[in-house]
Amino acid sequence: MKTAFLPTKMKFENRNAAAISTTVGAIIIIVIIIIVGVGVYAATRPSSTTTTTSLTNTTSTTTSPIIISSSTTTTSTTITSISTTSTKNSSTTATSSSTTVTGTGTGTGEQVIIPQGAASGKNFDPSSITITAGTTITFVDQDSLAPHNVWFTSVPSGATNPNTAAGQSSQYEILQGQSVSYTLTTPGTYTYECQFHSSWMQGTIIVTS
């Protein structure tokens, strides 16, 4: 009885060992396949970082500065247009507002300048002048700071005040670029001032025969 049982037991153990060996081998093969598959997938998988960078670069390149440039150009053109219009209007006003007083004299012309900065303390240039009867004197305003005028405060006996002859009222104005002219025919001394700055803007004209 004992001798018959031992061979049967050995056969059973050998079968179990073979089955276990087969199972382990299958597991090892499966693990190797998985490892190889993961490696291949990792090697062939597209890089998400590269794609993101590409998209970022594309977005940066697509952003166009043309709108900013166009806006700047339009603004510059508008400012230039306004500046040009303003200059033309100013020039037209100065020309049309010039006052000229003429007389019967035949002397040569003289010029007195109202200089830039006259509103801040400068006087007529020259402030005193001697002319012959019949000479026309033109006062030219070059000051951009404030309006001025030429107002005669005294005239020789028998002479008509040049402001009255011109129909000019007190406080009339001449602006930068404008001028006013008077022809003086009666010999004597004429004094004048700028009514707006009379403390320092005063002048004298001596007319000889």
Image (cartoon, grey):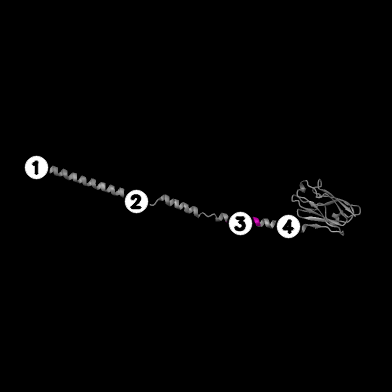
Point out the tag, 2 or 4, that comes first from the N-terminus.
2
Mark 3: give few (<14), some (14-19) or many (20+) Cα within 10 Å.
few
Give the residue drawn at x 61%, y 56%: 74
The kind of secondary structure element at disc 3 is helix
Q: Earlier in the sequence, mark 3 or mark 2?
A: 2
In percent of the image, x 19 and y 45: which residue is there? 18
Q: Which mark is residue 4?
A: 1
Quote the CA–CA distance across marks 4 and 1.
138 Å
Structural crowding at the residue carrying mark 4, measured as other residues with C-alpha within 10 Å and reported as few (<14), some (14–19) or many (≥20): some
Answer left or right for 180 relative to 1.
right
Q: Amino acid at mark 4?
A: Ser
Q: List the residue tagged with mark 2.
A: 41
Q: Residue 96 location in percent, x, y?
A: 76, 59
Separation of disc 2 and disc 4 at Cα? 82 Å
* Farthest residue, direction top: 2
The residue pinned by badge 3 equals 74
Give the percent coordinates (x, y) of residue 24.
23, 45
Q: Residue at x 60, y 56 (%)?
A: 73
From the viewer's perspective, is the residue at label 1 or at label 3 nearer?
Answer: 3
Asked if residue 76 is among those painted magenta in the image, a careful observer would answer yes
